Amino acid sequence: MKKILAVTACPTGVAHTYMAAESLIKAAKAKEISLKVETRGAVGVENELSEQEISEAHAIIVAADTDVLESRFAGKPVVRVPVAQAIKNPAGLLDEALAKEAVANDYVKRVEQSKSERSSARSGPYKHLMTGVSHMLPLVVAGGLLIAISFMFGIEAFKVEGTFAAALMDIGGNSAFALMVPVLAGFIAFSIAEKPGLAPGLIGGMLASSIGAGFLGGILAGFLAGYTTQFLKKYIKLPRNLEGLKPILLIPLIASAVTGLLMIYVIGEPVKAIMDGLTNWLTALGTTNAILLGLLLGAMMAFDMGGPVNKAAYTFSVGLLASNVFGPMAAVMAAGMTPPLGLWLATLIAKNKFTKEERDAGKAASVLGISFITEGAIPFAASDPFRVIPSIVAGSAVTGALSMAFGATLRAPHGGIFVLPIPNAVSHLGLYALAIVIGTVVTAVMLSVLKKPLKSNNPA
């Protein structure tokens, strides 16, 4: 029997979420279909779908008017409708889901599957931190690029009030970047305590930003708000007819007050001192220390290709953008592009050491590489880790070190080569591109030396 999964969610998380779930369950029973429904309401996620259930499902019905973490379903057929549709026509949605066909599993799909598996393997504080970072990133990307575009009119054109450059700077720097830390903290708390944690997290993040505690303060505020909210959810008990007050009134009120007071009187100032010290150290780095930092960040980006070590380097660099420190971000993006590009080049210069399937996969990896998707190297590393991983780590370390040595800076934390043509998005553009090329060549040459020729002299 084909298994169908469903997720229902409405903006308020009260009535339609549960009405839609009930309609789907009744229709599935009438049709004798195996169905499980996850609801995302005001009290949080109930009946949550497991990774095993998702992998075994034939298709997923997403009946929602809000975010339901749909990235979990990468590679699965999905029927997407407004939540009201599941109430009106549940039988039709089930029939549509049953009629869906499996998605082809090409190289890019394998990469997406690897990313999804890694995401599902995250747990505890790391998972919560990555949830905050992933929601913060669009603000950083949009804000950084808008700031860079404002520089097209002159490096100080934004200082003239009323100009187009000033407007772009106001949008990117004074608005998008101002939201970075609150959103980071808010969604860390959301990951821990679901919807009731969002308001305390946002408030704590805003306080961290206004105090000057930066992204470190935002991270601490997010965890503080999240775990405080989780504690209150567990231990505040009300009569059943008053339960609706918990997620809307009591928990946000108490958790926000606790988080805010601790940020103001206990956490804020010490973390601000740490951030100020870190910023001053980074801006005063000598050439030797800058090269060593770039070497370390570059190696971390390639070491696990999107895993915890990679994300630690990336999060560190993204967080520094709010403090106007842009060098580490440049090193990290360049080093993250190098592994897939180096593997692609290796399949070209050492064809006799790769199968035809691997050479075809190399073409796809090159596209992922220029797009700054380091995970494009995962299928190669999984099949030959003892040769591939040292090669890509060496190439990325060289790229990161060169980027820092050249004094390259980057104002947008993503986009790969597609952000390079934007004036002032990257400084020392020619040398920056050279660092990427050199690292790519290092990876390709090293892998070509380490890999043994195929048993057949004809690699086709």
Image: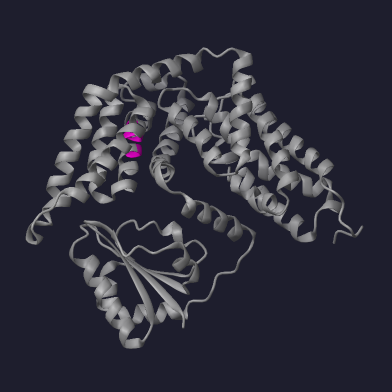
Q: In the figure, is residue 182 to the left or right of 79? A: left
* Figure check: 78 above or below 310: below
Q: Main secondary structure of the magenta part?
A: helix
Name the residue rendered at 63%, 43% in the picture.
370
Name the residue rendered at 79%, 60% in the picture.
356
Point out residue 8 in the picture as x, y percentages from the top left corner: 30, 66
Point out residue 103 in the picture as x, y percentages from the top left corner: 55, 70
Identify the coloring. one colour
Point out residue 352 in the picture as x, y percentages from the top left corner: 86, 53
Point out residue 12 in the picture as x, y percentages from the top left corner: 20, 57
- Magenta region includes residue 179: yes
- Magenta region includes residue 151: no
Q: In the figure, is residue 182 to the left or right of 337? A: left
Name the residue rendered at 48%, 74% in the picture.
58
* Figure check: 373 above or below 400: below
Span shown in magenta: 178-184
361 or 158: nearer the eye? 361
Residue positioned most to the front: 235
Residue 429 visible in the snapshot: no
Name the residue rendered at 31%, 37% in the picture.
222
Which quarter of the rendering shows the C terminus?
Answer: bottom right
